[in-house]
Image (cartoon, rainbow, N blue to C red):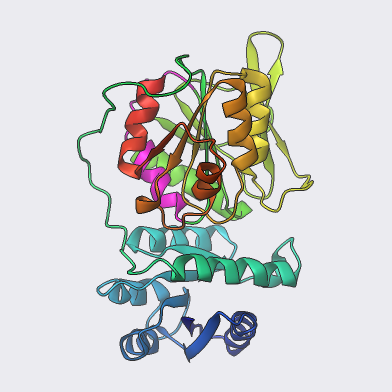
Amino acid sequence: MINVLIVDDSAFMRNTLSSMISSDPGLRVIGTARDGIEAVEKVSSLKPDVVTLDIEMPRMDGIEALKHIMENPVPVLMVSSLTTEGAKATLDALDIGAVDFIPKNLADLSVNIVKIREILVEKIKGIGRKRPFRRIIKLTHKPLHMPKASQYASKRRISIVAIGSSTGGPRALQNIITQFPEDFPVPILIAQHMPPAFTGPFAERLNQLSNIKVKEAEDGEPLKKGTVFIAPGGGHMKVRRKGMAETCIAISKDSGEYIYRPSVDVLMLSIVESFSAYVLGIILTGLGNDGEKGMGAIKDKGGKTIAESEETCVVYGMPKAVVNAGIADKIVPLDEIAGEIINSV
């Protein structure tokens, strides 16, 4: 049984979240709080396994409450408005130690209420099962870990890097991207499960922290070496060839058979079509199995594949699917992935 504390100043949200969470027999709501001060007190007294934490509240907001909660860390899901300002506050919360976020604007989502409940329950179970919870400490600049020798089935040099991530991904991506040099020789494309208002601020934040250029991808723009392209939330990012020499990005709003937009599978499958064996695919922390098909296609074509190891994943879901399918050339802890990428290009 995973015990959950719900923190929100809205009685409607407290009741809605309580109803969704309690509908699963493996979850139990052990309390609610109306502001940050109550939240800190109830985290101490009730000792929940997971906290859902609103950002905008009276007396003490969610960001200040989170700082107190992280003194004795508990997994926290932020309840965020799907706005640019909400995105910036949520990214701050992820920096402080929150694991992930859920949308406060439930009615604005493009999926139905049943799917919202499924995603909420899946996230709580995913982060609540990993005990004891270890806060992801603030990133510091440390020596880059470079692998001594290649152990991949393929010995080809790489022309493009594709990365997929979900829960815990923003912190993992920050760890990796900030270690790349300005003259990185190939383009990097990333599908991180995020809503539309979040991917732009996330790309901007990474760009400010990194030597390499990071941007939210735009439909029709050409791929450039030394640039990280973040797939926009709410759509799928693909790669398309324009003649023999030029390759560009295509953004599609069609959901198709895929639950998540952007989808890791959609991105990786399109890259394989254009670059064949000269692809490095990386799957990071996240729920579910998005990326398994794409990583399998990269492997089948003779490209290289890396899965983040369980020890550093916030949620060992997406990498586990790849590892269990026998697709991963290497299973690597987060701190070593940047070095593996640099060594492959």
Query: How many dots with numbers?
Result: 0
Is 330 rendered above or below residue 315? above
In-front residue for pair 81/307? 307
The spot of residue 80 in percent (x, y) is: 53, 68
On the question of residue 209 being in view, the answer is yes
In-front residue for pair 45/206? 45
Is 232 rendered above or below residue 151? below
Q: Is residue 128 left or right of residue 141?
A: right
Q: Quadrant of the C terminus?
A: top left
Is 182 rendered above or below residue 267? above
The spot of residue 292 in percent (x, y) is: 60, 42
On the question of residue 221 being in view, the answer is no
In-front residue for pair 138/24? 24
Is 319 rendered above or below residue 20? above
Please tell me which residue is depicted at 48% across the width and 18% down the height of the picture: 154
Please tell me which residue is depicted at 58% across the width and 90% down the height of the picture: 11
The extreme left residue here reads: 143
The spot of residue 169 in percent (x, y) is: 46, 50
Please tell me which residue is depicted at 50% across the width and 43% down the height of the picture: 323
Is 49 magenta? The answer is no
Q: Is residue 183 left or right of residue 82?
A: left
Please tell me which residue is depicted at 35% across the width and 52% down the height of the picture: 311
Q: Is residue 338 left or right of residue 77?
A: left
Where are the magenta residues, as a range? 168-186
The spot of residue 84 in percent (x, y) is: 55, 57
The extreme top residue here reads: 244
